[in-house]
Image (cartoon, rainbow, N blue to C red):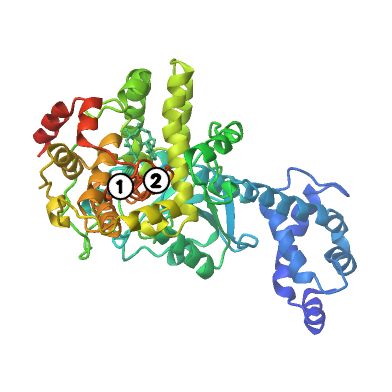
Amino acid sequence: MKSAKRLRHWRRAGRNPSLALKLLNYLCPLLAAKIPFGRLNPDVPQKELYLLQLVSRCLARPGKGPTQVVRRQLGHTILLADSFTMCQTAFTKTLAQIASDPRVTVRRAGPPDPAGRCVVYWMQRAQRVLDNSALDTAVRVANFLQQPVVIFFAPVPFYPHANLRHFVFLAEGIPQTAAGARARGIGYVLRRYPEHSLLKFCEEVKASLVVGDENPMREPKCWRELAARKLTVPLWTVDADVIVPSKLLAKEQYAARVIRPRLQARLQEFLIPHPNPKARVEWEKPRRLSVLPDDGSADITEGWKELDRSVQPVTSFHGGTDRALTLLREFVTGKLAHYPERHGKPELDGTSRLSPYLHFGHIGPQTVSLAVEQAKVPRQVKDDFLDQLITWRELSINFVHFNPLYDSIESAPDWAHRTLAAHAGDPRPRSYSRQQLERAETYDDLWNAAQRQMLHAGWMHNYMRMYWAKKILEWSPSPAVAYQTAVYLNDKYFLDGRDPNGYAGIAWSIAGKFDRPWFDRPIFGTVRYMSGNAARKKFDAERYIEQMAKLA
Ligand SMILES: Cc1cc2nc3c(=O)[nH]c(=O)nc-3n(C[C@H](O)[C@H](O)[C@H](O)COP(=O)(O)OP(=O)(O)OC[C@H]3O[C@@H](n4cnc5c(N)ncnc54)[C@H](O)[C@@H]3O)c2cc1C
């Protein structure tokens, strides 16, 4: 049958043959050469297999399988028809296999857009190319489709509590990430608000599929849902910043002792080195695509009138994967061996200080855990550290993932609600306003020192964070106000603030979360109390106070 006649015939039959014909004309010679009769040739390029799938959709009609239709109407493609089902199965199977990884959540299902030209990785939380399973997933899909992969990174000023301090740290990570991407043949497109639209970018580059990363916090959750609704191509997200994918825990875990064995049971499966694959098809930037320079020369906050610039950047931490890896090396080769006896002493620099890097995703928990696993230190030492990094960190992520009230006193367990309510009317011998606390103007030198560390270093030692939050409860008119004040200060000044660890730490300190009832006392009820005297017996508080005085 001549083409024109065939077209008329198909139109009468109510099918849209034009695309199918176009594809078949292109595919037949190709496939005749490549698909031996009755058997799927593994060398058939994936793109052709994908186009075949499309042909099937164009030709299919109720009661008639595509194979029959192709056989009857295009005699010379018998070869193609016999291999068709197998090709289609292979295509769907491979993509389904990638999507079946427990880290992956398919948020918008469907086949990749056949007109698509690349796979987009919408980078948000995992701001790195090293050991990033979201990026690795995007590369795997792109390699399968024989397409390039491009990272889209577009910071916005309206993330709650984000200020200049946070954005400077974030921006310091960009040049290394961009260079690392290029070394793997991956594109990196930096944009900033108001040019931050993922949808627009996907249209410009003709995305066939979008891969994002996971963040349990409220706002990114909303963005993901919105993107899934508005995108016209599939959206997958990958839980790249945990060892054990959050969704596998299924519900809120109420204590470290409960989550610990569950995480331990899955470490063998998930604490494994990353492949960090290269992109097979290198990304070439379309000539007209607008991008910001990613070498550090662009001010990503330019023009952001609404950004809080009152919180200045710190000199104590600089962002980026390289800096994180240096800190990790120093920690593993030096501090780790003494971690058990030193990590509770704020005047000693005995911890990794990696929390800002983990928060911004400049380093992943896998990289840190595997480096610690390989260290030449006793098992007990490794376990002490990994318990913080894996058990407590992933307990915090689980809390924020499953408890929508994570940033309010309402997240407290029932026993803590009852005891705090019973003591709500207790007199507060001392009370301070939020501003007095913010300016470190209390009678307590040790607390003021901790607050100074927060203000000037953008970080605080774990022991002091507990003490700091518990004193806010003691000095506030109510537990609810204390919680809000702690969240406000924590998120405003800490580089690692606005993180599940922060909400879990505040919930532990003020709302008894993950803890048990202790002795009853004023204001706290049975929520655990911490005193300045006890702290002074535990470590050299005077030395810590002196160190922090120098920061101001
Ligand atoms: C009131 C309060 C507020 C906190 N706010 C934050 C915050 O905003 N951001 C933040 O990342 N952490 C927060 N923490 C948890 C903890 O204090 C910090 O993660 C830790 O001090 C960071 O220092 P490091 O990286 O040297 O820790 P290391 O001792 O070297 O531990 C390595 C990693 O393990 C994780 N980790 C360690 N301790 C804890 C913990 N108690 N809970 C959860 N994860 C932990 C962190 O990711 C940390 O980077 C808070 C704790 C409390 C009590």
Q: Nearer the viewer, residue 112 or 399?
A: 399
Residue located beneath label 1 in the image: 170
Q: Nearer the viewer, residue 361 or 295?
A: 361
Find the distance from the CA under tag 1 to the CA under tag 2. 8 Å
Answer with the quarter of the image where residue 201 lies.
bottom left
Residue 20, horizontal then vertical, whole percent: 73, 69
Is disc 2 placed on a helix, strand or loop? loop
Residue 296 shows in the view: no
Asked if marks 1 and 2 touch (Cβ < 8 Å), the reply is yes
Residue 513 shows in the view: yes
- The amino acid beneath tag 1 is Leu
Q: Residue furthest bottom?
A: 12
Write the residue at 55% across / 45% down: 245
Residue 368: which disc? none
Residue 127 as seen in the image, left or right of residue 164: right
Residue 94, horizontal then vertical, whole percent: 69, 48
Residue 328, horizontal then vertical, whole percent: 36, 28
Answer with the quarter of the image where residue 547 lies.
top left
Residue 209 as seen in the image, left or right of residue 526: right
- The amino acid beneath tag 2 is Gln
Write the residue at 46% across / 30% down: 369
Whether 129 is drawn above or below 435: the answer is above
Residue 340, horizontal then vertical, whole percent: 37, 22
Q: Nearer the viewer, residue 242 or 460?
A: 460
Q: Residues within 10 Å of mark 1 (few under 14, many from 20)?
A: many
| Quadrant assignment for ligand 1 | top left
Is disc 1 placed on a helix, strand or loop? helix
Residue located beneath label 2 in the image: 127
Residue 81 as seen in the image, left or right of residue 97: right
For the C terminus, the quadrant is top left
